[in-house]
Amino acid sequence: MSDASAPPSPATHRPRLPGPGAAARRLAEILRVDHAGELGAVYIYRGQRAVLDARGGTLPAQLAHMEAQEAVHLAAFDRLLPEHGVRPTLFTPFWRLAGFALGAGTALLGETAAHACTEAVETVIEGHYAGQIDELSDTHPALAAELSGFRDDELAHRQDAIDGGAHEAPAYPVLSGAIRGICHLAIAISEKL
């Protein structure tokens, strides 16, 4: 039973900012951070594939499929940013490098670590999208619906990672916690800058 007096979770609803232009500023934050997140995801999978493609097996094909889905999401935000007059984050070049390094670094630790990276990232992103969908459902229903589709892909990626042995990665709690922390920091930076 939930406590009706408890405030809504930040992951499910973000309070509206007051003042003129607040709704437009918030939409800009959403589009900017989602663009950055999808860009980072593409580069994480590229980094993982750079290491794991040479090893063969089924994981590289799975990673290529997930990267292709993230590229579709990124293309949507590449379209949405100029449509709404929103600039990408100033950290775009850094997120490319950081995403690739995170992907390659976890892949060097092995397949289960690569899966742990995917599971950690997608857990954060799914919660982030869920909050945005809730926030946008009344004011931007078409965007909320598009984000719902993206969230479904992220949930599938997370489940694939769990099924692939994410929780069996070396030092899984530390690795997963660190990656989730990095994701939360990247979100906070990308929304504003």
Image: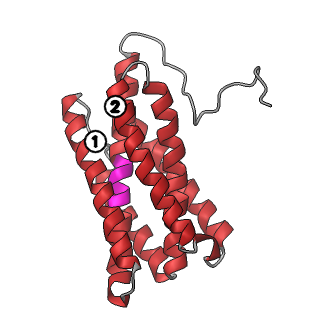
Name the residue at 55% across, 70% down: 163
Name the residue at 42% across, 38% down: 191
Rendered location of residue 28, percent (x, y): 34, 30
Q: CA distance from mark 1 to mark 2?
A: 18 Å
Q: Residues within 10 Å of mark 1 (few under 14, many from 20)?
A: many
Rendered location of residue 119, percent (x, y): 53, 62
**Looking at this view, is 133 or 19 the one in front?**
133
Rendered location of residue 87, percent (x, y): 25, 36
Q: Which residues are magenta?
A: 36-42
Q: Quadrant of the C terminus?
A: top left
Kind of element beneath mark 1: loop
Rendered location of residue 7, percent (x, y): 70, 24
- Do the numbered discs 1 and 2 sit on residues whose CB atoms are within 8 Å? no
Return the residue at label 2: 143
Compared to residue 28, the image places residue 113 above or below, namely: below
Question: Which mark, by number, is residue 151?
Answer: none
Q: Quadrant of the N terminus?
A: top right
Q: Sequence-wise, which precedes: disc 1 or disc 2? A: 1
Name of the residue lying farthest toward the top: 20
Residue type at numbered disc 2:
Leu
Mark 1 or mark 2, which is nearer to you? 2
Q: Residues within 10 Å of mark 2 (few under 14, many from 20)?
A: some
Compared to residue 133, the image places residue 90 above or below, namely: below
**Looking at this view, is 9 or 146 the one in front?**
146
Compared to residue 155, the image places residue 10 above or below, namely: above
Name the residue at 34% across, 37% down: 146
Residue type at numbered disc 1:
Pro
Question: Which mark, by number, is residue 88?
Answer: 1
Compared to residue 165, the image places residue 19 above or below, namely: above
Magenta stretch secondary structure, dominant? helix
Q: Is residue 156 rendered magenta in the image?
A: no
Side of 131 relative to 29 (left or right): right
